[in-house]
Each structure stands twice: as structure tokens, then as C-alpha cells.
């Protein structure tokens, strides 16, 4: 892995993270309020599922 790959991935994360608040700020705000009201265990499970899905997708892309 080259450092430029890591920085490119981080840049894409920032672009994707900025899409929803830029396109639909009210919907994004309502979603954040709902997330803030969730139990910590639920948020943790969502985070783990997201990480596993991302790692599996990355593996499938890199192996192909």
C-alpha cells in the first residue's frame, strides 16, 4: 500500500460524509437527532457491522 492510497481513501470519506448535509441538511439533522437518542450498544453494533461490511467489500475489490 502506498501512502497516497490511504490519503485518497480518507479524501473520499470526507467527500461522501459531506454529501448528505450538503444535499439534504434538514434530513441529515433529523437523522443525527435520532442517532443521538439511540442506546450506545445499538450504535456500537451498527459501527461493527459497518466496519465488517467495509472490510469485506475492500477485500472483494482488492482480490478481484
Image (cartoon, grey):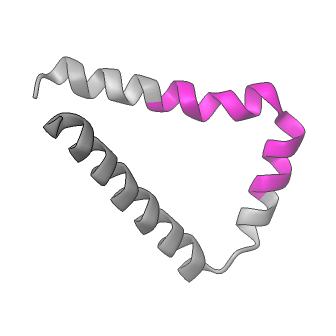
- In which quadrant of the rendered image does the C terminus lie? top left
Q: Is residue 8 magenta?
A: no
Q: Which residue is drawn at 25% across and 28% down?
A: 6
Q: In which quarter of the image is the N terminus?
A: top left
Q: Where is residue 62 in the image (x, y as percent from the top left)?
A: 18, 35
Q: Which picture quadrant has residue 21?
A: top right
Which residue occupies the extreme front position in the image?
A: 64
Where in the figure is residue 27, as x and y percent of width and height?
85, 44
Against 60, is 50 above or below? below
On the picture, is 26 further left or further right than 14?
right
Q: In which quarter of the image is residue 2?
A: top left
Q: Is residue 30 magenta?
A: yes
Residue appearing at x 22%, y 46% in the figure: 59
Which image quadrant for residue 23? top right
Q: Residue furthest right?
A: 26
Look at the picture and state if 41 lies above or below 18: below
**Residue 8 image position (x, y, % from top left):** 32, 21
Task: Tell me: residue 27, above or below residue 62.
Answer: below
Q: Which residue is drawn at 65% across and 80% down?
A: 39
Q: Please give the name of the residue rendered at 71% of the width and 34% of the height, measured from the top-left corner.
A: 20
Q: Is the magenta stretch mostly helix, strand or loop?
A: helix
User: Does residue 31 lie above or below 15 as drawn?
Assistant: below
The boundaries of the magenta stretch are: 13-32
Amino acid at each position: 500500500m502506498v501512502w497516497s492510497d490511504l490519503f485518497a481513501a480518507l479524501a473520499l470519506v470526507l467527500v461522501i460524509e459531506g454529501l448528505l448535509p450538503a444535499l439534504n441538511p434538514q434530513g441529515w439533522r433529523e437523522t443525527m437527532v435520532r442517532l443521538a437518542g439511540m442506546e450506545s450498544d445499538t450504535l456500537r453494533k451498527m459501527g461493527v457491522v459497518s466496519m465488517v461490511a467495509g472490510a469485506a467489500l475492500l477485500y472483494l475489490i482488492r482480490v478481484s
